[in-house]
Image: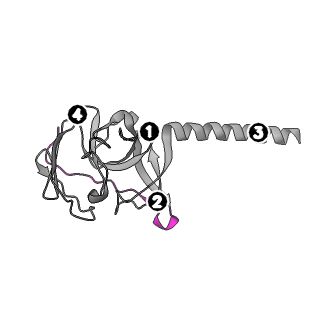
Amino acid sequence: MKNVVKEFLQSLVIAGILAFFIITFVAQSFVVDGRSMANTLQDGERLFVNKFIYRFNSPERGDIVVFSPKGAPDQKYIKRVIGVPGDTIYIKDGVTYVNGEALEENYLPDKMLGDFGPYEVPEESVFVLGDNRNHSADSRFKSIVGFVDYDDISGRAFWVYWPLTEMRVIDHQNYDLSFEN
């Protein structure tokens, strides 16, 4: 009986260490709160975030990232990366432009209201927007979010696991732009 208890405790300790390592360095669960990413992500969906990817690569245009905004550092937001360092972003007549090129954003549920920018993305930062632009606190609003520093990014969303009927790999937009920085 003593050996069974000892083996159980050893297994429990090993499982705890592995769980701590995975949550700290590899992946973490996140709950979508609100409708700023509709129709791509829905309020209440649970997903996994890859915390490992940005240790080796910088965020790219189209990535859906989880981050801590400057205006609310104790919270986590989820948005889409629109601009990377050196990009100039502006929004006119509901169309988002990156370095003068209009983005094709067929995932947006509604045409965005208002004109914004231009914004020049600084080094080690990204410009993020919610997919539901008319209901999103994002980089357009400097006091709430502003530019997101690489250090404030928790990771890249990759898999919705709840509700089970909506389980899927998250489709990140691959912008086919004719320019590069």
At 10% from the left edge and 47% from the top edge, which residue is drawn? 100
Q: Which residue is mark 2?
A: 45
First-in-chain label (4 vs 3): 3
Q: Find out whether the residues at labels 3 and 2 contact each other: C-beta distance under 8 Å.
A: no
First-in-chain label (1 vs 4): 1
Q: Residues within 10 Å of mark 4 (few under 14, many from 20)?
A: some
Q: Which residue is mark 1?
A: 52
Label 3 sits on a secondary structure element that is: helix
Q: Magenta segment: does it hold 30?
A: no
Q: Amino acid at mark 1?
A: Phe
First-in-chain label (2 vs 1): 2
Query: Which mark is in front, 4 or 3?
Result: 4
In percent of width and height, residue 71 lies at 36, 40
Magenta-highlighted residues: 163-181
Marks 3 and 2 sit apart, C-alpha to C-alpha, by 34 Å
Q: Nearer the viewer, residue 142 or 124?
A: 142
Q: Residues within 10 Å of mark 2 (few under 14, many from 20)?
A: some
Marks 4 and 3 sit apart, C-alpha to C-alpha, by 50 Å
Q: Amino acid at mark 2?
A: Glu
In percent of width and height, residue 156 lies at 39, 45
Q: Nearer the viewer, residue 120 or 17?
A: 120
Q: Amino acid at mark 4?
A: Pro
At 46% from the left edge and 59% from the top edge, which residue is drawn? 45
Label 2 sits on a secondary structure element that is: loop
Q: Is residue 128 left or right of residue 17?
A: left
Q: Which residue is mark 4?
A: 122
